[in-house]
């Protein structure tokens, strides 16, 4: 599902949320003019991993987004040292999804706990300070 479809579906979903509920989105920022759409919908409140991961809140405050800048591949390159070359990035987007997911998990395993802790801490801080 493309980013635009995800964001439109998120808007519809957010309208039905209760006062204490938030929607968590994970999206790519993209490159070029496509960035304007995300910039119009979200306010970036924090940056992690040398700016390859932003934590943002929607203007209506019903959604929090983890935004990979410009895409998940750039984030993976920063945190794992892999998926930096075009041939490696192509590997992520083609082939058997089960194989790709297993390889990605193997690559991420050594860093996963650190990433989860850092992102979770930032999310808790964001929710606490902007509620």
Image (tube, rainbow, N blue to C red):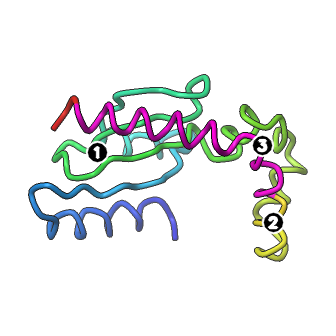
Residue visible at 56% across and 26% down in the picture:
51
Choose the circle earlier in sequence order: 1 or 2: 1
| Mark 3: few/some/many CA within 10 Å (<14, 14-19, 20+) | few
Which of 66/112 is in front?
Answer: 112
**Dot label at residue 102:** 2
Q: How far apart in space, not on screen, are marks 1 and 2 (Cα)?
A: 33 Å
Secondary structure beneath disc 1? Answer: helix
**Dot label at residue 85:** none
Secondary structure beneath disc 2? Answer: helix
Q: Is residue 86 left or right of residue 15?
A: right
Which of 108/64 is in front?
Answer: 108
The answer to whether the residue labelled 2 contacts the one labelled 3, judged by CB atoms less than 8 Å apart, is no
Q: Give the foreground label among 2 and 3.
A: 3
Which contiguous range is marked in magenta? 104-128
Residue visible at 9% across and 57% down in the picture:
19
Decide whether the magenta segment is chiefly helix, strand or loop. helix
Q: Position of residue 68 (x, y in %)?
A: 55, 42
- Circle 3 sits on which residue? 110
Q: Is residue 130 left or right of residue 71?
A: left
Choose the circle earlier in sequence order: 2 or 3: 2
Q: Give the foreground label among 1 and 2.
A: 2
Task: Indicate the quadrant where residue 112 lies.
Answer: top right
Quadrant placement of the C terminus: top left
- Circle 1 sits on which residue? 41
Task: Indicate the quadrant where residue 49 lies.
Answer: top right
Check the image and report above or below for 120 versus 91.
above
Which of 1/126 is in front?
Answer: 126
| Mark 2: few/some/many CA within 10 Å (<14, 14-19, 20+) | few
Residue visible at 52% across and 71% down in the picture:
1
């Amino acid at each position: 599902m493309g980013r635009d479809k995800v964001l439109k579906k998120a808007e519809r979903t957010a309208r039905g949320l209760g006062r204490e509920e938030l929607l968590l989105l994970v999206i790519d920022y993209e490159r070029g003019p496509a960035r304007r759409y995300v910039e119009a919908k979200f306010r970036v409140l924090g940056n992690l991993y040398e700016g390859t991961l932003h934590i943002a809140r929607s203007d209506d405050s019903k959604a929090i987004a983890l935004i990979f800048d410009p895409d998940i591949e750039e984030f993976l390159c920063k945190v794992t040292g892999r998926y930096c070359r075009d041939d490696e990035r192509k590997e992520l987007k083609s082939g058997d999804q089960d194989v790709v997911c297993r390889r990605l998990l193997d690559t991420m395993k050594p860093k996963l706990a650190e990433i989860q802790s850092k992102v979770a801490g930032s999310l808790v801080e964001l929710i606490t300070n902007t509620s």
